[in-house]
Amino acid sequence: MLAALARVRDQLFRLVIRPDDRPDERLKKQALVLTSVTISVAALVWSAMYLWLGRPLAAAVPLTYTVASVLGLAYFARSGNFGPYRLSQISLMLVLPFLLQWSVGGFVNSGAVMVWAFTGPLAALVLYSPRRAAVFFAGFVVLTLVSGVIDPIVSASTAPLPAELRLLFFVLDLGAVAAVVYAVLQYFVAQREQAQLETDRLLHNILPVPVADRLIAGEPRIADDYAAVTVLFADVAGFTPLARQASAAEVIGLLDRIFSAFDELADRFGLEKIKTIGDAYMAVAGAPVARPDHVLAAADMALAMLNATAQVSADLGRTLEVRIGMHTGPAMAGVIGKRKFFYDVWGDAVNVASRMETFGRPGRIHVSGAIEAALRGQYRFEERGTMEIKGLGEMNTFFLLGRAE
């Protein structure tokens, strides 16, 4: 039974959801359709009960809601215009319960059926802005006051129902309204939480997880200083002439294979991918989470990157090599941007590592003297000697060869 109801619900949702709807729009449409259909079913039950009691005028009121809801849903499904459907549904939810109460004979005789009207302001609060929803709530208050003023008149002009039936309607009205509101809000909250999880997942894909969690927690500005990190740059050698000869699909496919392999290595060795710029790849060890072995982790990843590039080259039947540059030193990191967040690293560690990559050689890992000093005795190096590095002057640099025997 529940599975069948779920299939009917999903079919109704497919009638009104458009492929280009934003997640929040989709959720609002689903919540209103679910509320409208649920109340329409309840309205048919109430209409049948009033007909059985010999109150055709009272029975016509909930029946009117059902018919109007079906017509409104058909219009919405055909036109895709959510605004009129939303306004008409909320207005019907607000006004018709009061009309039903007046036709039956007031608060007591109707079992306070006007409580159904409170679904109108609640729906407006979900579907409109708080300011707009306040208008519907004000309408509820006004209609309640009017009901109080005219209650002696309508109760005196209408034959009362037996006490047992009045009690039954009190129980049904209060219980049914509570059940409908709870069920719809539970669905809305569950879908909202799912949407929030998806948003968090996307943010975690864009930013480092610790940084994303700090943003989600409400930290207004993320800016951190690090005494020492290790920055790694990699660049595909000969990429420009390759890009001229290949199609866009081939170029993008090639970069995707290489960079996806590098991403897997970053996860394995605990580095944080910062960005790709064209055919260049940047990662850092020791930020955003500080670690004492950041130089070793970056060195192991750099060596694995050479192997991964060779594997991709063999798989694709192309000659591919990367230049890799590394340096360790102080840096700062943080998030910039308001709409499109971007986590980046700045400082000497970045500048020198970039120069190491630029002045390196294809298939080699070019590192600064600071890297060699930190890994001396644990890794093998080939001294390149003193060379002039643009913007940095003379530096004694090395090629990282591998772990020490």
Image: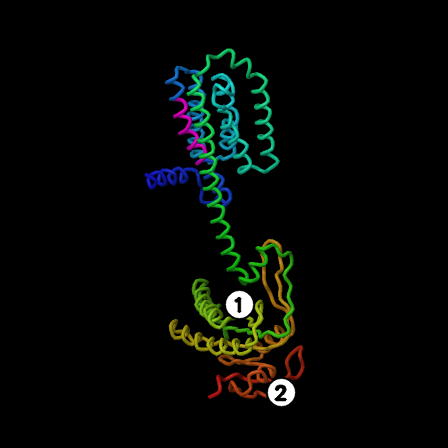
Residue count near mark 1 (Cα–Cα under 10 Å), binned few <14, some 14–19, many ≥20: many
Q: Could you tell me which residue is drawn at 50 percent across and 77 percent down?
A: 302
* Percent x, y of residue 89: 49, 30
- CA separation in Å, label 2 and label 1: 30 Å
Element class at badge 1: strand
User: What amino acid is found at the position of numbered circle 1 in the picture?
Assistant: Lys
Question: Above or below — where is 123 with respect to 205?
Answer: above
From which residue to which does the magenta span run? 34-47
* Percent x, y of residue 273: 53, 67
Judge depth for marks 2 and 1 and give the one in front: 1
Give the quadrant of residue 386: bottom right
Q: Quadrant of the N terminus?
A: top left
Question: Above or below — where is 34 with respect to 140?
Answer: below
Is any atom of residue 277 visible in this view? no
222 magenta-colored: no
Residue count near mark 2 (Cα–Cα under 10 Å), binned few <14, some 14–19, many ≥20: few
Q: Is residue 150 left or right of residue 247?
A: right
Q: Which residue is mark 2?
A: 386
The answer to whether the residue labelled 2 contacts the one labelled 1, judged by CB atoms less than 8 Å apart, is: no
| Observer-nearest of 68 and 147 | 147
User: What amino acid is found at the position of numbered circle 2 in the picture?
Assistant: Thr
Q: Which residue is mark 1?
A: 273
Q: Residue furthest top?
A: 157
| Observer-nearest of 184 and 220 | 184
Is any atom of residue 2 visible in this view? yes
| Observer-nearest of 359 and 203 | 203
